Amino acid sequence: MTNAATDTYDVIVIGGGPPGENAAQYAIKGSRRTAAIVEHELLGGECSFWACMPSKALLRPADVLAAAKAMPGVREIVGEARLDVPAVLERRDSFTHNRDDSSQVEWATNNNIDVVRGRGRLAGPRTVEVVDSEDTVVRTLHARSAIVLATGTTAAIPAVPGLREALPWTSRDVTNLRVVPRRVAVLGGGVVACESATWLRALGVEELTIIERGDALLAKNEPFAGDLVRKHFERAGITVLTGATVEEVSRPDARATGYGQIHGGPVQIRVDAQTVTVDEIVVAAGRTPASEGIGLESVGLDVSGSHGFVEVDDHLSVAGVDGEWLYAIGDVTGRALLTHMGKYQARIAGWVIGARAEGRPLTGPRFSDQADHDMVPQVTFTDPEVASVGLTEAAARAKGVDVEVVEYDLAALAGTALLRDDYEGRAKLVIDRASDVIIGATFAGPEVAELVHAATVAVVGRVPMETLWHAVPSYPTASEIWLRLLEAR
């Protein structure tokens, strides 16, 4: 849908993922300002169609089945049952609307936001060119107040001989899989790799190998989290190779068969001194900022020194561009490659754009990005889950913070024992000795995702440890961990 009546808007957003949608909405909310989103794929972006939504739709059935098998009185009914794969995939497709973005476009229309189809690129100050698939300019847009870059990232393919030619699955394929390969190798040991391995095994992959060049899984978390996930993977029959180097990939019969289809014949992967043969290979080895080809040079920006990421200040204004008209949000900034953080940045950028358009001062914390400074929450939906916020102990010490740490066994709580018979988990707080406030928290175990927001409030609010004694956890719930951590201290 396009609005051919005008080529001038108050706000133009390049990129229509959730951050872009939020930026457009918040920048014009409650005003007569106009906004347009330029998007060359699907409005709703990576999260809606290829990442957050389909991945969690694949993970939840596996989680429910695992919990059922760990509960007496239920496991006898479930027995050795496996997931109904067609039903799981059908439910996933219902959340992605079979990659139909018409409902997203309807949302934009209802919020007075125009959707302009095509690839957007800067063409000088306050100017956006919209180009088609042939790179032909089909429309030129002008912004009165602001342009927001929300182009996100794409899957990185490591420079391994033969890997790109093998047409491996990326995150888009593995979340939109149409068939379940019998043998799969996952390259990487981070969040995407570990979540993908979780649902692939649950959906019936018989031989699953994780190949990680680092020494641990989920290396950005506290070490116990990755260790616990690895232990559960190996119990499930998944082979985990860490400290491993992929030397070469070979797939003579590689074919572009479409998202989630097996891309040709068997794949041979030479890993150190061994060869792993699989039916499909999943690359989950990081993300690359989608900043190439969006016209940054037209406004004097060179991002080669920041690995392609667009640097911003805490108002989300792009560094190095005068005039307070260019902003960047989400993954392309490199601050935190998480949808919820991109949306958080979008809200701030929207408020800033609105205030500047109306000549209001940027006073108060609402107009400044604070959470990206060591207060980022994240959940990894593996079995067990890993939920964290703020700094790990190692990261805090690397910053020179004098910290105290306290840990506790989550399985020792009545609340978690009631959740499932095989509960295993651990919790850890990182405390700044000087201020006596929590600067980091990590939870690993089944259903710990719901614990992280309380920790986030404590970290962001800098709640004194003594005050936490008066935050009484309900019994018997997993939140009792807060009392036990205080007692353990």
Image (tube, rainbow, N blue to C red):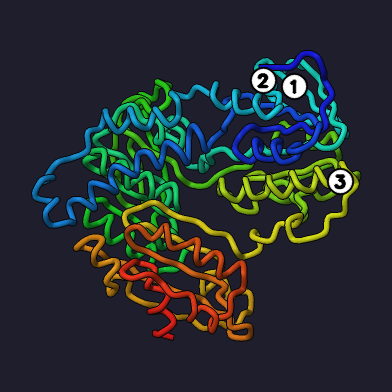
| Residue shown at the point (76%, 54%) measured from the top left | 367
Q: Quarter-wise, where is residue 409 in the image?
A: bottom left
Tell me if 66 is positioned left or right of 370 in this view.
Answer: left
Numbered disc in front, either 2 or 3: 3
Circle 1 residue: 130
Q: Is residue 281 left or right of residue 152?
A: left
Residue 300 lies, with reference to residue 261, above or below; the image says below
Residue 257 relative to residue 364: left or right: left
| Secondary structure state at the residue bearing disc 1 | strand
What distance separates the C-alpha of mark 1 from that of mark 3? Answer: 26 Å
Q: For this rendering, which residue is in front, 102 or 98?
A: 102
Q: CA distance from mark 2 to mark 1?
A: 8 Å
**Label 2 belongs to which residue?**
117
Q: Residue 438, percent across and down? A: 55, 75
The N terminus - image quarter: top right
Which mark identifies residue 473? Answer: none
State yes or no: discs 2 and 3 in contact (Cβ < 8 Å). Answer: no
Q: Is residue 179 placed above or below 151 in the rendered structure?
A: above
Tell me where residue 354 appears, x and y as whole percent: 81, 43
First of labels 1, 3 by sequence position: 1
Taking the spot 85% from the left edge, 36% from the top edge, the residue there is 145
Residue position for label 3:
356
| Circle 2/circle 1 CB separation < 8 Å | yes
